[in-house]
Image (tube, grey):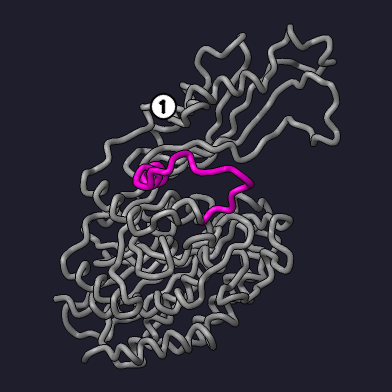
Amino acid sequence: MSLDIEKVKEFSNKAWDENILPTLSKYIEIPNQSPLYDANWATNGYTEEAIQLLEKWILAQGIKGIKCEIKRIEGLTPIIFMVVDATKTENVKTVLMYGHMDKQPPLTEAWDEGLHPYKAVVKNNRLYGRGGADDGYSTFASICAIQALQQQNIPHDRYVVIIEGSEESGSIHLPQYVEKFQSEIQTPSLVVCLDSGCGNYDQLWMTSSLRGVLTGDLTVRVLNEACHSGSASGIVPSSFRILRQVLDRVENQITGEIDKQLHVEIPPYRLEQIAKCAEILGSTIYDEFSWYQGTGPITKDLTQLMINKTWYPSVCVTGAEGLPHTSNAGNVMRTHTTVKVSVRLPPSFKHTDAGNILKNLFESNPPYGATVTFKADKSASGWDSPQTKPFLEKALGEASNLFYGKDHVYMGEGGSIPFMKMLNDRFPESQFIVTGLLGPASNAHGPNEFLDIPFAKKLLSCVIYLLDAHAKNA
């Protein structure tokens, strides 16, 4: 039976307007931060409130053959685990669909007037609020895609849907669930992940690679107790100056170049995809950011910018301790300085190797004999997608043209989805569709996070089409 494309479009529009947006808005209003950022996640009730809201919505959709459960392992964030029986009778395959329900910290004070991380606001065809695009919508899109096939009586594959609660913490709790429920997951022929991004809102974007990540605390300690800066400066080396020196071992403060030990060789076909992507995106690559006054990108070479973002390592300092607020900073030589260092790693780089390399670079031969320590607290390897099979490549192009009117594009992402690497290692023969709503200015993890509603409707249509194409492939 053939899929009716016009009915798919009608379904997607109606599903978002009448079925997804109301409950997704309620989800946005729950402050369920990921466990790395909320030590009280297990007791404050927010994670439980969010997962119960999603489960209730899922069960109300009338999906035929669904078994939906909240799975729990003591001490870990719960997951929603769903299995939908196949309606095909021959060549039945398993499709694994993945999303997450935990959120990044709110950054409340940085949001624009009239917006709030835990208040859903629809403005200019955008839904604002923390976690809507990253990645609350994935639960709704996954279930609605299956629902659309069933409404048209299209024979479909067996679906396993996992919605986890620790992705923003590096998916630290997910491996135990995958191991425990491996027999129910089985071996997927296709993995669909809706937690990624798009380069524009004009076509379907396929994520070809993801960078890894490693974060940790870098501390420089020089004194047992603070003292008058007039007495100590010029004699005692500043912990902040030593910190600058050891950071410079990893990242050249003038050029931004990262130590060669953290680089990998980029496959030639990926370089070709990057060049095509850069040509399509143009100056959007850097125009999407809210630059302050005269600040600009580190280069205007668009291809190089995309290489930097997707395959080169990078370093950011994302937090600090030992520094008083400027309004309360006296003339004191401080005992120490601690910064949170976030290092993005090339897609094929092993995160375990990165921890050892960084520790050695930071701690060896400390200036002035100071005590320098680096303690990694979170790490995950990146992911380089397996090459797409011809049938799926054809279906991707058809879906993008049918619903967006343009060809699909491959784009590496600078961020991480730790589960993808784990799945690819476990199921090396599986095909992957990794896509998402995080486009220009959508600002996941930052203030004013939003999803583009018209784009989301078309993306849902694409997912419906791709699930059907996979089911029809012999």
Residue drawn at x 24%, y 76% as measured from the top left: 398
Q: Position of residue 264 (x, y in %)?
A: 31, 35
Q: Is the residue marked by circle 1 packed among few (<14), some (14-19), or many (20+) residues within 10 Å?
A: some
Q: Residue furthest top?
A: 235
> In the structure shown, which secondary structural element does the residue marked by tag 1 occupy?
loop
Locate residue 392 relative to residue 366 in the image: left or right.
left
Q: Residue furthest left?
A: 474
Q: Position of residue 371 (x, y in %)?
A: 62, 17
Whether residue 170 is visible to the viewer of this picture, yes or no, is yes
Q: Residue furthest front?
A: 294
Image quadrant assignment for residue 156:
bottom left
Instruction: State the extent of the magenta-drawn residues as a range.
Output: 288-310
Q: Position of residue 13 (x, y in %)?
A: 46, 86
| Nearer to the camera, 463 or 374 | 463
Locate residue 100 relative to residue 388 in the image: left or right.
right
Residue 236 part of the magenta segment: no
Q: Which residue is the site of mark 1?
A: 259
Locate residue 431 relative to residue 452 in the image: left or right.
left
Image quadrant assignment for residue 11:
bottom left
Image quadrant assignment for residue 433:
bottom left
- What secondary structure is the stretch in magenta mostly built from? loop
Locate residue 84 relative to residue 372 in the image: left or right.
left
| Nearer to the camera, 179 or 407 | 407
| Nearer to the camera, 90 or 430 | 430
Residue drawn at x 63%, y 47% as measured from the top left: 292
Q: Quadrant of the N terminus?
A: bottom left
Kind of residue at badge 1? Asp
Q: Position of residue 452 (x, y in %)?
A: 51, 72
